[in-house]
Amino acid sequence: MTEWAAQVGRIRVVGTGVMGRGIAQLAATAGVTVELADVRQDAVVRAIEYIGGMADKLATKGKLSTEDAEAIKARLVAVDSPTAPADDVDLVIEAAREDLETKRTLFAELERVCGPRTVFATNTSSLSVTEIATGFADPARFVGLHFFNPVPLMRLVEVVPGARTADWLPAAALDLVRRWGHEPVLAPDAPGFLVNHAGRGLGTEALQILSEAIATPADIDRIARDVLGLKLGPFELLDLTGLDVSHAVLESIWSGFHGDPRLRPSWLTRPRVAAGLFGRKNGEGFYRYEDGVQQVESEPTPPPAPDCPVYAADEGLARLLGSAGVQVVSDAYPDAVLLVTPFGESTVDAARRAGLPPERVGGVDPLGRFERRLTLSVHPGLDPAAGRAMWGALAATGRPVSVVRDGPAPIAQRLLASIVNTACFIAEQRLAAPADIDTAVRLGLGYPRGPLAWGEALGADELLLILRGLAASTGDPRYRPSAWLTERAALGLPLTTTGTTPADLLGT
């Protein structure tokens, strides 16, 4: 069976919605004959027309030849029923609705009408592959193939073996996905598989920050985009996905890991779902949408640069302010406003540790080295006039400034530490290989780099400083550092490698 992937020439896609259409288009483009089946025959007709239209559009744009477009359309075959005889089908991919009993029943029927060498796959994004497989007489031929929407453009595919999947099948499925031009990763049959599990790091911490009234969704998103380099902020992403969907995923993964504090959802999502604040799909979520366009209030206009001197504890920030014409002093003179750069601590704690008067101290996050956005943290004891002077001084640099409430650590640090620590827990539990974790998150979530590589760039010691500071300040076990992180910090090993294991000694 090692040559199976090369021999796959005919598949059946069951379910012709958005995902089924995308999978069919991908396979047909790769040269495979694709049977399309659905409980509604009109849906099959529309799917074939849609895929044909996409092929013609690509030909018009010069991305396909006219001959290739016609060949793709010729490979699409309408089937009267999902369970029509399929002796010559090499692979069946199910893309039906997310209901466990529906999938179990469907596969039990498909197993009866398919040949003894047919392989079966589910595109489920949230159900256990092993639990679906209980509908089979022979679950060894069953595997998860989780594609992402839109399938032709999202190159990632999670290959998810069940507990009874044959040993040869995961490697063969990985090979097949590569032959189709996509990038596969081996993912565990655990809650959220790989991408949805890793993605909890950003969303849960962003919701936690919002629940603490540290900043607005728009400010958190701006910081995530400008400081961390994310394409979408966490609340933009929640609105895009739909909070009705995301809330269910948050709750499912948290309960699936038996209430692990690092995955704890926020109380904020349930009432918002009850109120119908789903996001783009119905025009209102964390943002409002008019004709599909996100409505965001402009950032407030900052005051002018101050006449008073400014002291900046960070040399890089001092140089930036000085180059903008701000009067920068090298000591905390009584008439100066004072800027500290807290790392893994609050502005108040940073001021106290430096022996500075808190009423004249504001915090500026050093993460990102002040390149695209500055974040000013305001604590309750800050003199308002001093705070406005700080804001004006920072705005004089030409960078946008987010003015937020002080917290146990700056916002960008909290988000990044959560992203990396979540990935470290996945690696620690051997749910996936480090390279697969990074590939899955980079391709599946659009992060600028994989979380383990990102953590390596920042440094394990720095991440530990943030997490331990958060844990000490809040007492919340959600911030406990992963053993993967603490071990590698202690040993000076990269976060991106497994290191020595018992198997290396045993030769297994």
Image (spheres, helix red, strand yellow):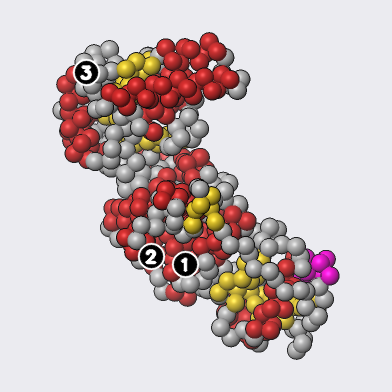
Q: Residue at x 36, y 50 (%)?
A: 245
Task: Judge by depth and name the residue closer to the eye, 68 or 49.
Answer: 49
Which percent across, then down, holds residue 503? Answer: 38, 40
The relative height of residue 395 versus residue 192 in the rendered view (above or below) is below
| Cα separation between marks 2 and 3 | 47 Å
Dot 3 surroundings within 10 Å: few (below 14), some, or many (20 or more)? few
Locate residue 320 relative to residue 173 in the image: left or right.
Answer: right
Locate residue 178 relative to residue 103 in the image: left or right.
Answer: right
Which percent across, then down, holds residue 28? Answer: 43, 19
| Cα separation between marks 1 and 3 | 51 Å
Quadrant of the image containing the N terminus: top left
Q: Residue furthest bottom?
A: 334
Q: Residue at x 51, y 60 (%)?
A: 415
In the rendered structure, which amino acid carries the disc numbered 1? Leu
**Quadrant position of residue 26:** top left
Q: Are marks 1 and 2 in contact (CB under 8 Å)?
A: yes
Which percent across, then down, holds residue 201? Answer: 45, 56
In the rendered structure, which amino acid carries the disc numbered 3? Ala
Q: Residue at x 34, y 64 (%)?
A: 271
Q: Which residue is disc 2 drawn over?
A: 268
Locate residue 199 relative to residue 35 in the image: left or right.
Answer: right
In the rendered structure, which amino acid carries the disc numbered 2? Leu
**Quadrant position of residue 479:** bottom left
Mark toward the start of the polypeptide (1 vs 3) = 3
Q: Which residue is disc 3 drawn over?
A: 84
Residue 505 visible in the displayed image: no
Could you say which disc has been placed on residue 52 in the image? none
Residue 204 visible in the displayed image: yes
Please report the bounds of the magenta region as a residue range: 318-325
Could you say which disc has been placed on residue 210 in the image? 1
Q: Residue at x 52, y 73 (%)?
A: 407
Q: Are marks 2 and 3 in contact (CB under 8 Å)?
A: no
